[in-house]
Image (spheres, rainbow, N blue to C red):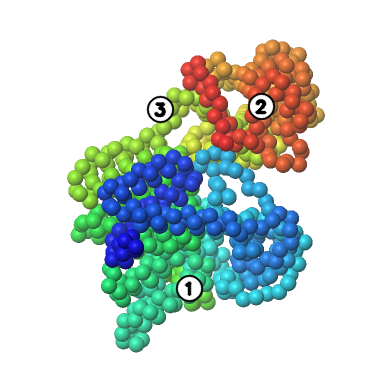
Amino acid sequence: MQLWKKLKNKPFCNDTHFFLIGVLLLLISFRFKIVFIFLAFYLLFIYKKIKMLYPVVIVISIFIVRILLDNLFTIDDLKDYQIRITETDDNGYDAYINFCKVRVSDYEHSYKPGDIICANIKIIDIDEKSYASDFDYELYLKSEGIKYYVEANEQEYIKSSFSIGLIKYNLLAFYKSKLSNDTFDYLSTIVFGQNNLDSSLKDGYSILGISHILAISGLHIMLLFKLLAFLIFKLIGSYKETIPILIITIYVIAIGCPISAFRALLFLYIGQLNKKGSIQYTKLDILSIACMLMLLINPYSIYNRGFMLSYLVSFLIIFMNDFIKTKSKLVENYLSHYLIYFITLPIVISITNYISFFSLLLAPVLTIVVTYIVLPISYLVLVLPFLDFIFKHIFGFINSFVLGLNSASIGVPIMSFNFYTAIIYYILYLILLVMIAKRKGIIRYGVVFILYILVLINFRLINPIAKITFIDVGQGDSAIIELSNNRGIMVVDAFNSFDYLKSIGISKIDYLVLTHSDTDHIKDAIEIIDYFKVEKIICPKYDDGFKEYNPIYVDYNNSFILDDVKIDVLGPIKEYKDKNSNSIVLRFSINDYSFLFTGDMTIEEEMDLIDRYGYILDSDVLKVGHHGSISSSSKEFIEIVSPDYSIISAGRDNIYGHPDKEVYERLSSVSLVLQTINSGNISICIYKNKMWIDTYR
């Protein structure tokens, strides 16, 4: 009863951020267990200093119950269900089954929102992440409120019904038929929150540091609200907020409630409570309440990039006047941009892995251009689509300008932030913000903050550990050899490895070795050559699939040097009929630990290697040939190589049955066998005279 009186007598209208911090720590701790320690210390702080432990614990308990409720509604595998479709795209559709939101993989469907079908559902297992900065598709689906990823077999159309999503679907279909591609892409992205921009254009905006403006955001909503309020004032002669809020509400619902737009709508509603009630919410209160309401709807929203960007930027804007006090609008604009740029940097870096100096110089100006030119024109297209003959040239020019800036961009690569480097980054950033607000220690803490970023950019230069990473690329091959202190980098094969290479912040590859020309070894080669500075491309002498690369062709007579490491080419010894037998075979040693890379070498080539080299083939680590196929890894070869570790790169449930059971047992009899299927990325780390294995999973 006393607690209820306390809650009743004090609305906590100026303390809601304490509740939010507790909720955030709780939700993050479910993924990163170490955060439970921070949550415990935070509750102790609340108990000792703020005297609000019970209310905070009650709010946290509500969220625990909310998460547990997710387990009440489930669907079964291989069972018939009635499916109500809510949203569609070229890759499939979102739907509801038994109150569970699902994502259906279907590239050939012809459904639209509101359609109801019956189908047999097969739940698809989503592969785990392969490395720390890898895209987590399962977590992404959860952040979108999607519980299952499924296939729908034996589909049978039942009927159509009304769906809010049908409004957006029909409008997009209408405008797509009326507009040029460039105009439609901007309209669908900015007005409807459906990012259809070309991937190179997305990267361009991200590298320039203004990608957050393009997505449907609080900025759009507030501009629309002010415009509607102004128009209504001109029409009826009085300032009414109810009508524009109602129109904005309908608009946000019709476009599917994108996170930033929904957050801005909550801001409008909660802001109106300030005018109608006795409780006066601060902007921080409104931000905190809106955030908790959204997390209550879907706790996994916390891992959505749009959610994170929206609330980080909103938090900063609330206090911007405390940080920046200047009469110059230009200076204010630049300083505001830099504060926003750095608060979003860890998230943006996970997309671009690049810090552009152009962004630091030009982005504040580009922000004005996008805000006051691109956004208004995009909404103008909505009501004047027949003027596309003008709009398409405007958007075409903007695209050319952004892509031109991107291609001419000068900057530095930077590795993706992991959880711990991001935590340190934001602690330093918050300290810097406090110093800016207090107007003291700005230079000292600013230098510390910049030094930390410089350490991350140049981490490879000071890292004394050599690392050989076998990248989890699925049914294919790719590995990267990184010498200590950034003395040299060699990439062996290039299947599905571009994203990982980009994520570790490298700019130059000394050698790109392509063991043979099968797609599962060279798929990303062109992309890697175009993006990174590749000094030399090494290809096998008896394979004519590399003419476009202008490579150096090698056979067993060759070797090359990576700083102080000699790379011996042991094969191919001669030309074979089987392309796999023509694979490059490499052997090298780092600090007396030896490695043997065998491409897709077959038993025929293995026998020739044994005849020529004998026990010279003995190696500590063997990159197993042909993904563990029965066509490689003969008993004689394994015995003479006698590896301590055998690494198999193969995809889950691949159609070839790799690795072969007999080969696996043969390797297990002499070595520890590690598979990317189970381990994700597999790294062999070497420091002085020590070697150890680091697997992601």
Contact between labelled residues 1 and 3, with CB atoms less than 8 Å apart: no
- Residue 492: % across, % down: 61, 30
Point out the residue furthest to the front here. 1
Asked if the residues shown at circle 2 and circle 3 are in contact, with their CB atoms under 8 angstroms apart, the answer is no
SS for callout 1: helix
The answer for how far apart the CA atoms under marks 3 and 1 are is: 52 Å
Residue that carries the numbered disc 1 in the rendered image: 251
Determine which residue is flagged by label 3: 462
Q: Position of residue 53 (x, y in %)?
A: 34, 52
Tell me the mark number nearer the camera, choosing from 2 and 3. Answer: 2
The amino acid at mark 3 is Ile
Q: Sequence-wise, which precedes: disc 1 or disc 2?
A: 1
N-terminal label among 2 and 3? 3
Reading the chain from its start, which is encountered first: label 3 or label 1?
1
The answer to whether residue 413 of the structure is visible from this angle is: no
Q: Which residue is at a point 22% across and 58% down the rendered structure image?
A: 328
Q: Amino acid at mark 2?
A: Val
Q: Position of residue 548 (x, y in %)?
A: 64, 38
